Image (cartoon, helix red, strand yellow):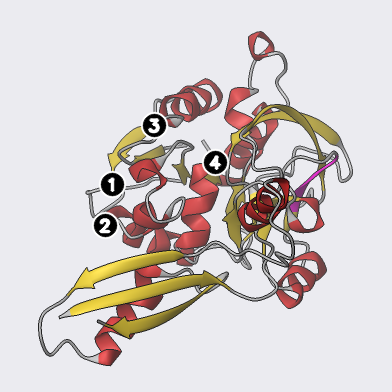
Amino acid sequence: MKLRIHVTLKPGVLDPQGKAIEHALAGLGFQGVAGARVGKLIELDVAEGTSDAEVDSMCRQLLANTVIENYRVERA
Amino acid sequence: MKTAVIVFPGSNCDRDIAVALERVTGRAPAMVWHRDTELPEGVGLVAVPGGFSYGDYLRSGAMAARSPIMRAVASGAERGLPVLGVCNGFQVLTEAGLLPGALMRNAGLNFVCRDVTLAVDNAQSAFTRRYAAGERVVFPVAHHDGNYVADADTLDRLEGEGRVAFRYAEPVNGSARDIAGVLSAQGNVLGLMPHPERRVEPAHGGDDGRRLFEGLLEVVGA
């Protein structure tokens, strides 16, 4: 079973990389980019029947740092 | 004082901190591999060194924080064992939940490698007792992810409880409230981005870092 875990910075956490991307896009002449945030996409191949609770636990214990990040699980 | 230095794949300041500990305590520390599950008997201080454990994969310190030895470090910390995390060690301690907050990419995105001036914020802890409150000291920094982040409530609590050990006295990495080093609630765990172990003798350009280890030695005992 394939899962895609989207890890994103929590709103309000400053993202220096996102800021740099925003500025670089403006530098390339793209107007109207009001914000950029950098996150991660983690693809997992897990055993069939892996429970939501178990996947949630994987995210909390390792894949995301919940001090600064949110996560969302997508079943592919 | 018997000490231990945890070694992860990718640690690179383990030798620096081992040399500093040996200079101050007169005994070479035990070098403890990350796969070990127990700390050596009678250890009075655990150092989690700087470096790039696991190549900073996923997040700086994330993998190291989940390695077997960190369970022993966490249970020692709970019992009051002094634990010092420097640079990547600080990142590991926050990832392990032994210290609050997180260390993000430096605000300027640059790797910062230079001497910086710090102000001692709390001079009462086991780590800072040989300094004066407000004293300026110079320690080197060498990091890419030193930008300390925590929510406003946590920052207020840290400041209110005297848990900010050191602050940057100059702009370095964008850290919230210029925090360079934080203490645990019990005060026996310190994490800081600057490297006191690289400032322990005049040949290093100064010895401001030495008193951190000397203070610990006084508290823990020879």
Q: Tell me which chain the residue with mark 3 is part of.
A: B
Q: Tell me which chain the residue with mark 2 is part of.
A: B
Q: What kind of element bears circle 2?
A: helix
Residue at position x 51%, y 71% in the image? A8
Q: Nearer the viewer, mark 4 or mark 1?
A: 1
Sequence-wise, the earlier of marks 3 and 1 is: 3
Tell me which amino acid carries mark 2.
Pro
Q: In this view, does B24 lie to the left or right of A33?
A: left
Residues indicated by labels 4 and 3 sit on the same polypeptide chain: yes
**Does B166 appear in magenta?**
yes
Q: What numbered label is drawn on residue B68? A: 2
Tell me which amino acid carries mark 4.
Gly
Q: Give the range drawn in magenta.
A: B165-169
Q: Tell me which chain the residue with mark 1 is part of.
A: B
Mark 2 is surrounded, within 10 Å at the Cα level, by few (under 14), some (14 to 19) or many (20 or more) other residues, namely some
Mark 2 and mark 1: span between their CA atoms? 6 Å
**Does B59 appear in magenta?**
no
Q: What kind of element bears circle 1?
A: loop
Mark 3 and mark 2: span between their CA atoms? 20 Å
The residue carrying mark 1 is B34
Q: Is residue B76 left or right of residue B67?
A: right
Give the overall secondary structure of the magenta segment.
strand
Mark 2 and mark 4: span between their CA atoms? 28 Å
The residue carrying mark 4 is B221
Mark 4 and mark 1: span between their CA atoms? 26 Å
Asked if residue B82 shows in the view, the reply is: no
Q: Which of marks 4 and 3 is in front?
A: 3
Sequence-wise, the earlier of marks 4 and 1 is: 1
Q: What kind of element bears circle 4?
A: loop
| Label 2 close to label 1 by CB (< 8 Å) | yes
